[in-house]
Structure formats: structure tokens, C-alpha cells
Image (tube, rainbow, N blue to C red):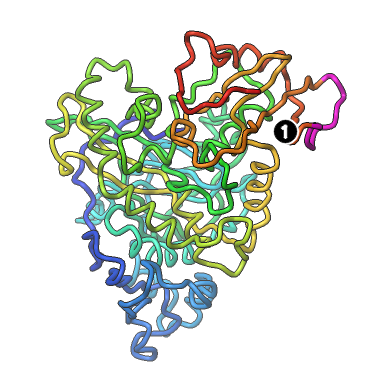
Amino acid sequence: MALSELPQREPGPDQGYTEAAQHQHQSKADPPVAPPIEVARAHHPAANPAASTPAFPDQQQANHVGFLAASLLAVETPAAAAANYPLHGDEMWQKHFKHLPRGSKPVAFVGEGAANAVFEIKVPQHGLSDQNFKGLLLRVAKVPALGQPTAYNYLFQQKFYQTAIRPLLGNNAIHQELVILRSSGIIDELNRLLQELDHTRKAKFRGSFVGQSDWGLLIEDMRPDTKAPAPRILVEFKPKWLSQSRSAPARAVRCRQCALELQRKLTRPVTGTGLFTPERKPCPLALVDDEPPPPAVSSPFRIAPQLIDAPEREHLQTSLELLLHDPFLDDLRAQQEELDTTGPLKAIPEDEKFGIAMTIRDCTCFALIPKDAAARSAEDIKIRLGDLDWKDPHTKIQHWRGTEQALIDGGFYTADWILCDGVYYYPPTLCLLEWKPRLFSTGATDVIQLLDADANRPTNGYAAERHVYTHVAETASLRAKLQPYDGGDATPINPHHPPPY
């Protein structure tokens, strides 16, 4: 569920940051040093003086990220950390982290994904303790059934955030911090709320609940303040792969993300009767193109299609254009390129840099923009990047390789046409590469041929022709969705698009 679709928060100040490293668009030769993180200590500082030093003291690293290496992969569990600490476990936790007080209650269910849920909470007013939670939401891990312990390693993820993400993204990274839930009673309260709302949740999430854990994460609340004198709107989008995959074919006419979208459209079971709407999702390459993108792919409303018919459309368009010109996207692209030097097909499980590259490729951009007036400068827009949990190459490398190989072998990178029941259609994508002059000339055109699923034909493999890729699909349903792309008057004219034969 998108944050922008959920109840808005009560007013509160923007969450500040206490970390020393501030993002100033520093040069790659002098990246910011990661701030120290308390959970990295296995012993009291007096017994382990080196533990209080920054995780990555070398300021001359070639990339923005210090290698995670063994220190990150060996983060202790809360129980082990407490056992090794000279203080009593409760005292250690109280000393170094916020503790959610008993009597804290969930105010609203904000949203959920497959592994986590987010709630707005209210804490009892004990002196200034409630001020420590202003402007923050509680993120907790989910499990398939009530009463199960979570396998989510909060200390590991927070150390990854502190030692890799914060130095990489600076203040553009959404603020998050560990919070102790032990003895607060909040887990039972959260699950009672989920049980009450279970019938309203997405079908795939129903029946899942919050796992038993001593730990949670406090994250910056990016929902608009409805009582602010200058109201704002929350825009959410995923920048994804901001440069072409290094494993993509040289003849690719589609970027990695647009190729994946095409594969999903043509090979997954067809749902709904609506038409394909590529204009409602951004092409990542168009977000950071050094030249003005062609009008067919450059609409800023591709990152916020829900705003295209808003009464404030002109103001919002100006604000969205300013958002897309913010340096954070160029920085994110440079970091992706620097961390991934091989592409998925040649990446190895031991390459932690590649894991970080895949992590930031899956991040979500949250941006608060003015509602009733156009943004005049970058200061009028608040940008944060979230959804930055570690993607482990050891467990995901086969999936990443398989996805990339399927895009190549299926023609989704290179096909200029779709052949369905004897009719040629343009692919229902709006990729920047499709609208750029071709850098190659082969005389042949790649075609994706869709065969009827009821014809009992093989589901994989090439057709006899060299550049025809055959897929079994629900052709009857797809024909209706492809109809606007049959080359008729409603189809945008692309001067770089070759004929189908």
C-alpha cells in the first residue's frame, strides 16, 4: 500500500539527524566517513577502544561505500551482545537505544510489504519521552502466523544502514534508528489491530502478523502534515536501474527495467480489462538523460500519474520537473555504476558491492512537493530514499542471473515488434532507448511472437527465424490490450523504429 494513499499524519517537526556525516555532494575521491554505530561493539568501549571509531576510517576509498566484509556479516544477535557486555542486558539496551515505553499504542496502520509492516504509534507522555518519537513511524517484521519469532536481524540491517547506506546517500537516506520493544507490550497491540483490519488488507498479506521480537525500527514519517500552512503532496516512485545493465545485449532497444516490464505484461496471466499504461511508470534512463528526452517519454507525471488530472496540474508539473532535476538522481546513477562493474550474469556471490548496487536499485524515493504553488527551488522539496534493506548476493544471485538471462533469451531487450495472431504491434513500453537513434545496423528486426496458450505449444525456445522469439500467452486477452499499439493513427510516430519485416 502506498504511503500517499494512507491517512495523513498530525503535524510535527521534520525529523532531524544526529549523525556527523552530512551529504554535501562530495567528490568521489573524498567520500564522507560512516558515523560510528553502537551495535558494532561486542564489549564495553573501555575494553575495546577501537570499537568507538568510525566503521570506515579510510577517507581515500575509491567508492562511496566501505566494504561490508566480515565485520558486517558477523553482527551479533541482541542476546549475544547483551551476554558479552559488562553491563546487565537491560542496562546496556537502555543506555544506547530508545526504549518504547509500556502503554504505547498503535494509532494507525500505515502500510505493509511482504516482510515488514509500518504503524503510527502514540507513546505515553512521561516528561519529554514522547518528544523522542515525534515524526517517527514504527517498522516491524512480519511472520506467516501469530506467535512466531521473526528471523529479521535488526542489528545487522541497522549496521548496514549506518556503515553503507548513510555514507552512500547522506541526508537523502530516510532516517531510521533501532528501538527496543522489550516489555512495551506493543507487539500484541499491533497484532490486535491487524486482526481487526485483516479483511481490508491485500489478499496476499492476510493472515500474516507481526513477529515476536525485542527490536523494531523507527523511521522518518514522510506523510504530509495536513495542518501545515503550506500543504504538500507526497510523491513515491522507484528510480530502479538508472543506467543500462552491463549484461544487456549490445543491440538492446530497451533498458533493463522497461524490458522487465514488457516481460511481465506479455508472459504473466492477463488480469483486468484495462489497457496497458506505460506512461504511468517511468523509464529510469529518461529520469537521468543528459539531453532533453523526447516528448513521448519525458512527461514528469510518469512518476506521479495520480496527479495528472489534479486541479493544480501546472504547479505540480513544475514541481515534479524540479524534483527530477535534483542531483540525487545523478548521484544514485553514479553509485549504481560504480558498485556494479560486471552486470548480473558475471556477478559473484562474494561481491558485496554488487549487493549494495542491487539494494539501492530497489529503493523508493519519497518526495514532498508543494500542493498549491509551484516549487521555486530545491529547498521547497523534501526528498528521502527508503526501502534500503540489504540484498544478499549469496541468496539472491541465482534469481538475479535467471531474470537477466530470461530477458535476453526471450527477446525482451531487443524486440521492436510483437506478432500476435498475424498482426504486428509496437511493444507497450515507452523506453528512452526505443526513441533514440540506433547504434547498430543489422538489417534484421527482432520480433516477439505470441502463440495461443490453448494451442499446446512449447513454452520456450526460438522460432525457426533467427530473430523471432516465441512465447505462449493468452493471446485473446492480450489482443485487446495491444490494440492501441497496432501502428494506427493513435500510435505515436517513432522515426527510429524499423519496419517489422
Whether residue 18 appears in this view of the structure is no
Give the tally of numbered discs.
Answer: 1
Given residues 208 and 238, the one toward you in this image is 238
* Residue 459 among magenta residues: yes
Q: Position of residue 458 (x, y in %)?
A: 85, 31
Three-letter amino acid code of the residue under disc 1:
Tyr
Q: Is residue 30 left or right of residue 192?
A: left
Please report the residue visible at 25 percent of the width from the left and 26 percent of the height from the top: 317
Given residues 124 and 203, the one toward you in this image is 203
The residue tagged 1 is 469
- Would you identify the image quadrant in which residue 500 lies? top right
Residue 475 in the image: above or below residue 376: above
Q: In this picture, which residue range is highlighted in magenta? A: 454-464
Please report the residue visible at 68 percent of the width from the left and 49 percent of the height from the top: 402
Q: Is residue 463 left or right of residue 61?
A: right
Label 1 environment density (alpha carbons within 10 Å; few <14, some 14–19, many ≥20) = many
Whether residue 171 appears in this view of the structure is yes
- Would you identify the image quadrant in which residue 2 lies? top left
Residue 244 in the image: above or below residue 22: above
Q: Position of residue 465 (x, y in %)?
A: 77, 32
Residue 394 in the image: above or below residue 374: below
Q: Main secondary structure of the magenta part?
A: loop
- Would you identify the image quadrant in which residue 120 lies? top left
Q: Position of residue 188 (x, y in %)?
A: 51, 46
* Residue 29 among magenta residues: no
